[in-house]
Image (cartoon, rainbow, N blue to C red):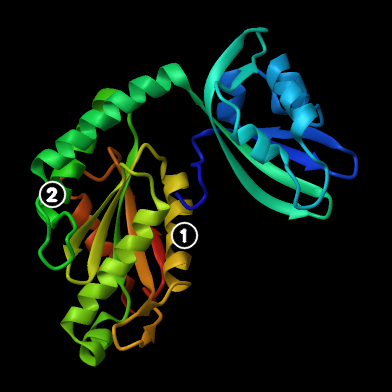
Amino acid sequence: MLLGYRSNDAVVTICQNNRAKSIEINDLNKEAEDMLGYRSRDMAGRPLQQLLPPRIAEMLNEYVEFERDANDVGQVLSKVQSFSIIGQDGKEAGYRLKVVRTESTGDAIHFKLVLQDKTGLRRNEALRKAIEDNFKGHEVLDEDTGLPDRHSLEKDVELMGYYSNKSDLRSCFAILHLDHYDELFSQYGRPACHAMMRHIAAICRQGLRPDDVVGSILYKRLGVLLIDTTPESARMVFNRLRWQIAANPILLPDKTSIGLSVSISFCRIGGRVSEKSVIEDCSAAIENMGAQGINALIEVE
């Protein structure tokens, strides 16, 4: 994932202030409030150590260095085994922790602590494993790209429609359309265009979670299935994918560098669009973009 987290993850935002030699809580998102029992407005400005059990708080006090390019709080927390937080009820609970460094402004360094409840995580991982096994069971690879073919994606979407109703596991599907395909095909030929699609797929794979799916819809279109996400979070992911693709030209065997762009249509699975028509409706949205559909993003509702 390009951000390292999604909008429906529980996130505590913190700031290391090197001048004040402090580590303070900035914000808790709603998911973190629900998980920990605290209100964000009550915790803003408090030392992070107040949320931590003594052993972890002592590690921060001992190992965090309040200097530029030194051992910061993100590096220290990333090395903590069995991370836990003391909730509003006073009880210590363990979480899987992911530390995402965001922006730095002067002496202030900001981090997002992404928390996943271990009990719920185990249930979720078992469900994800079952889904992944189902995906692999019916997967057929496209000869030109080596990606799951359209029929495989149709089966995947149908399966996620089932889990959306059964387990409330949210997901979104998108089509990525290679802009200016006819011109690229005319100038560089079919093998180069296949290489372009594989290049775009590789960028997607680098930025998505391991169990998200990238497949081939058509010679100039990819399908992307995001597991466990909301439309709001998916929009952020697809926006960043568009710019990531634009920022990474493909280098052909003859050393020609070509900049690429994609237009994206996406929709929520389990919403108003039937899972049986998700791919067709997203494809139609691409067609309807017309001349305006260059590096564009549209949600199908």
Closer to the chain start, of discs 2 and 1, is: 2
Furthest residue in direction bottom, as rendered: 187
Q: Quadrant of residue 296?
A: bottom left
Query: Relative to residue 180, is residue 200 depicted above or below?
Result: above
Residue visible at 41% across and 77% down in the picture: 249
Q: Measuring from the top left, give residue 256's x and y in whole percent.
A: 36, 88
Q: Nearer the viewer, residue 289 or 67?
A: 67
Residue 50 is left or right of residue 149, and the answer is: right
Q: Measuring from the top left, give residue 295's x and y in whole percent.
A: 41, 72
- Image mark for residue 239: 1
Circle 1 crowding by C-alpha within 10 Å: few under 14, some 14–19, many from 20: some
- Image mark for residue 205: none
Give amino acid for label 2.
Answer: Ser
Real-space Cα separation, disc 2 to disc 1, in angstroms: 25 Å
Residue visible at 76% across and 22% down in the picture: 58
Q: Which residue is mark 2?
A: 152
Q: Is label 1 in a helix, a strand or a loop?
A: helix
Q: Is label 2 in a helix, a strand or a loop?
A: helix
Q: Nearer the viewer, residue 80 or 149?
A: 80
Q: Measuring from the top left, give residue 31's x and y in whole percent.
A: 55, 28
Q: Nearer the viewer, residue 192 or 65?
A: 65
Circle 2 crowding by C-alpha within 10 Å: few under 14, some 14–19, many from 20: many
Query: Relative to residue 207, is residue 182 depicted above or below?
Result: below
Query: Relative to residue 60, is residue 212 depicted above or below?
Result: below
Q: Nearer the viewer, mark 2 or mark 1?
A: 2
Residue 32 is left or right of residue 18, and the answer is: left
Q: Quadrant of residue 25?
A: top right
Residue 92 is left or right of residue 139, and the answer is: right
Residue 161 is at least partly visible in this image:
no
Q: Measuring from the top left, give residue 239's x and y in whole percent.
A: 46, 59
Give amino acid for label 1.
Answer: Asn
Q: Nearer the viewer, residue 131 or 74?
A: 74
